[in-house]
């Protein structure tokens, strides 16, 4: 890993994104080559940090240490602005450093993601929605902020809209993955919301599907939908090429939210998701839209 060249690093990130990002990878293809590569690097970094926090073969203390080591490596790379030759680093780091410098992405975003994943290794017990929103900022909002730097933006109002967009996407994940998360001891729904509908963490663990649960989920879905709507202004602040990918992401995540609603909020029985053909169609339309813009821009 030590001798990975910059081109090798970019190739590694692209292969990782191709094999694990699935439909998002094909959505990236609508961007210019440099932006496409940068999105693959961003994905590779975020995916690796997430995997370090979810290593099933490791106990919690080992996962904590893995994330601490990753934080130290990131700090060293950013401080020395190069990869130390006498140490072993993840293959994504040379390309990551290049992307951060090229697109002037604040390095604090990458540390925030580590902090967010670290918090997943502790008992999850958010008392208020504000606490949950702070967590969502760290694991999703900062990803949106990195994206708009890569896509290009022309208005600083893109930052707030990007954070709201990340919140909408992460809330969708939380509602979809309620069963999987509780099996790992994680309940992200704030206590104040559970109290509002007379539902409890124990009820979630027991997967009790009743009117209380449906009312709770309806409330959460509606709030999430409001964040989708309020963050739509982001389209006005970013480049047309970025708009194509963003539209695809809205349709993919928003489609999952619609599926949750269509199932009468019964996320306990089955996982809400879009059929593969539909996800591929959305990704394909994003590619066509972005390439159409590029062709007409340079006519």
Image (tube, rainbow, N blue to C red):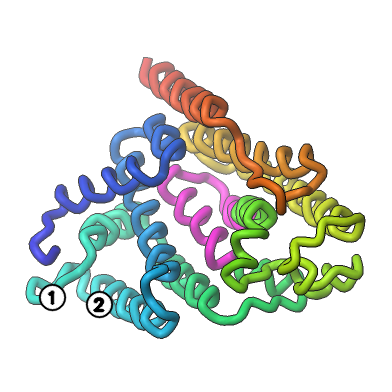
- CB under 8 Å between discs 1 and 2: yes
**x and y percent of residue 290 in the render?**
45, 26
Looking at the image, which is closer to me, 80 or 202?
Answer: 202
> Disc 1 marks which residue?
87
Task: Say which label, 1 or 2, has the lower sequence index.
Answer: 2
**Farthest residue, direction bottom:** 61
Q: Quadrant of the C terminus?
A: top left
Q: Quadrant of the N terminus?
A: bottom left
Magenta stretch: helix, strand or loop mostly: helix
**x and y percent of residue 138 in the render?**
54, 67
Residue that appears at 24% across and 55% down: 95
Magenta-colored span: 137-164
Magenta stretch contains residue 163: yes
Residue that appears at 64% across and 46% down: 271
Magenta stretch contains residue 276: no
> Disc 2 marks which residue?
76
- Quarter of the image where one finds residue 90: bottom left
**Farthest residue, direction top:** 299
Residue that appears at 63% across and 77% down: 124
**x and y percent of residue 239 in the render?**
49, 37
């Amino acid at each position: 890993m030590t001798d990975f060249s910059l081109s090798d690093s970019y190739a590694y990130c692209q292969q990782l994104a191709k094999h694990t990002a699935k439909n998002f990878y094909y959505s990236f293809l609508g961007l210019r080559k440099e932006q496409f590569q940068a999105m693959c690097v961003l994905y590779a970094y975020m995916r690796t940090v997430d995997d370090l926090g979810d290593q099933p073969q490791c106990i919690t203390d080992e996962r904590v240490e893995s994330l601490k080591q990753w934080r130290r490596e990131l700090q060293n790379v950013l401080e020395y602005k190069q990869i130390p030759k006498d140490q072993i680093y993840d293959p994504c780091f040379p390309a990551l450093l290049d992307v951060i410098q090229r697109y002037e992405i604040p390095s604090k975003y990458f540390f925030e993601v580590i902090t967010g994943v670290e918090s997943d290794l502790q008992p999850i017990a958010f008392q208020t929605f504000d606490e949950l929103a702070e967590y969502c900022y760290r694991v999703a909002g900062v990803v949106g902020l990195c994206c708009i730097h890569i896509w290009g933006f022309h208005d600083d109002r893109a930052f707030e809209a990007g954070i709201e967009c990340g919140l909408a996407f992460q809330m969708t994940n939380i509602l979809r993955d309620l069963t999987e998360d509780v099996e790992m001891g994680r309940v992200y729904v704030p206590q104040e919301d559970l109290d509002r509908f007379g539902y409890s963490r124990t009820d979630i663990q027991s997967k009790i599907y009743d009117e209380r649960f449906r009312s709770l989920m309806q409330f959460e879905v509606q709030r999430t939908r409001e964040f989708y709507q309020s963050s739509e202004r982001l389209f006005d602040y970013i480049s047309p090429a970025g708009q194509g990918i963003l539209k695809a992401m809205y349709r993919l995540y928003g489609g999952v939210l619609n599926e949750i609603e269509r199932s009468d909020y019964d996320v306990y029985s089955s996982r809400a998701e879009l059929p593969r053909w539909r996800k591929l169609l959305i990704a394909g339309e994003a590619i066509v839209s972005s390439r159409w813009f590029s062709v007409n821009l340079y006519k």
